Image: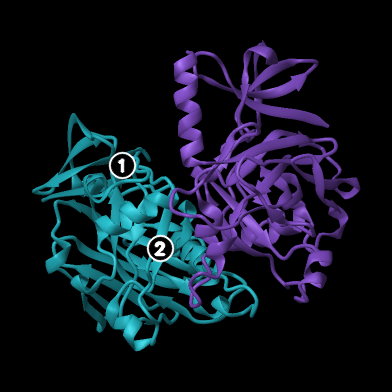
Chain colours: A cyan, B purple
Amino acid sequence: MDTWMRLMANDGSIVFGRTENGYLHEYEGIDHPVPTGAVLSLRALTPLAPCAPGKVVALWNNFHALASKLEKPVPEHPLFLLKPAESVIGSGETIRRPAHYAGKIVFEGELGIVIGKRCRNASLEEAQAAIFGYTVVNDVTAAGLLSENPHFPQWCRAKGFDTFCCLGPAIVSGFDWRQARVVTLLDGVERQNYALDDMVFAPAQQVSLISQDLTLEPGDVIACGTSLGVGSIGEGAMVSVTIEGIGTLVNTLRSQQAVEQTQVEDERVA
Amino acid sequence: MDTWMRLMANDGSIVFGRTENGYLHEYEGIDHPVPTGAVLSLRALTPLAPCAPGKVVALWNNFHALASKLEKPVPEHPLFLLKPAESVIGSGETIRRPAHYAGKIVFEGELGIVIGKRCRNASLEEAQAAIFGYTVVNDVTAAGLLSENPHFPQWCRAKGFDTFCCLGPAIVSGFDWRQARVVTLLDGVERQNYALDDMVFAPAQQVSLISQDLTLEPGDVIACGTSLGVGSIGEGAMVSVTIEGIGTLVNTLRSQQAVEQTQVEDERVA
């Protein structure tokens, strides 16, 4: 198992690499990463989302427990929508409430699969080999928009807003998801705690089946779907999603006005 | 009005620029394009999709005539899904039937808006200024998948397959879409012929409203939705979509097996 992070240096440059004892060993490329020889102290770097996906494929109804509670049959093929690259933020960044939306915003703690190799019509073995590693996802949704229009469920819009795809803090390669649980806390109170071995489509199956539909590129992420305990995030509330062995992803929801107010205050102090 | 194309040279390099009398005047960047000084003969170049979008935002129910025929109210906000970057092909390229899908595949001739500037929470004026130009779109759909699962309409999957977003042949800046019609032929027979001034959300409105939801990046495309006359494409059938003043986008549908067979034959001749 190796832990990989993507971080920003003081000069704004972005570095990616393997972390060990408080240091980053820099690598180039997520597809066959090659060490550059540089070793940097993590203390001087600001964490970013651990990869920069071109797209995020987000699964719906991929856990037996949730399907059973919602009284939906489990699907025969992964059911998914796409979240755009611009929706991605890292741990510690702010989830911004859309300016013209006053409704419910919900968290969904999930496992994320990070693709390491271009993948099209992949067999199960090829799919397994194309997985670079795993990360933690908070798949944020403006739940009130999903059924706002009775003729067209707005999955992409409700889940595609800027900052609505929290990823991080790290990618762990060689991670054994079968033994792991997803634990989501809302302001410190446990709201989700589910076993990943309850998944309908396991990660390699997801990669193989989705790659029959569309080409997956290095850095792309598949969010594996969530299980029981999804809930609403209030203004200023903090969501932390933990998968032991990967880490804890922490994000706070703020309205646009609150974000701007904080910036003004920061400027006054600066 | 200027006409812009993106093409491949014999050495595999990609050039973008303004076309004039059979020549390409090369430019760098679609966000404030700067001439490189190079002038190339179009005859030595292979046309590609005229831009390389990070994402394609595809509208549903954006024409009064189609809404009226389907007896749906026109929406109050653009209803959209996302098509991934990997679904994009240019004029002359082959639409590939997905290997594991035997159902109906339909064409939709559409106007495409090409974004020239990063755009977030844009006013109508800012949105207008962020439009680089217009192109022609064939928004291909595996129609049988849309309602395959009764609990989750698979818009992204049905419209997101590799090769299911045909764009081209060119982008025209300063184009007056209000006077234009979209004409779609299937194997030479007219199937769609509709006026763009029947749109529910005009291009600048679309850009402004969608930019409240997600950041639009230079090169991104909004497919404006289609109107009456959508139909099924048979194996080997040719779809050509024309918007006078922009050009004609031509694509043929082939099964994976037929594409592979053609490659084998090409290799035998080579």
Separation of disc 1 and disc 2 at Cα?
A: 30 Å
Q: Chain of mark 2?
A: A
Q: Is residue A25 left or right of residue A11?
A: left
Rate crowding at label 2 as few (under 14), some (14 to 19) or many (20 or more) other CA atoms within 10 Å: many
Q: Farthest residue toward the right?
A: B179
Q: Chain of mark 1?
A: A
Answer whether labels 1 and 2 touch (C-beta < 8 Å). Answer: no
Return the residue nearer the eye: A260 or A98.
A98
Task: Tell me which amino acid carries mark 2.
Answer: Ala
Q: Quadrant of residue A167?
A: bottom left
Return the residue nearer the eye: A78 or B102.
B102
Q: Is residue A260 left or right of residue B111?
A: left
Which disc, if any, is residue A9? Answer: 1
Which residue is tagged 2? A58
Q: Position of residue A220 (x, y in %)?
A: 37, 49
Q: SS at mark 1? A: loop
Q: Position of residue A43 (x, y in %)?
A: 20, 49
Rate crowding at label 1 as few (under 14), some (14 to 19) or many (20 or more) other CA atoms within 10 Å: some
Q: At x 67% / y 59%, what residue is drawn?
A: B59
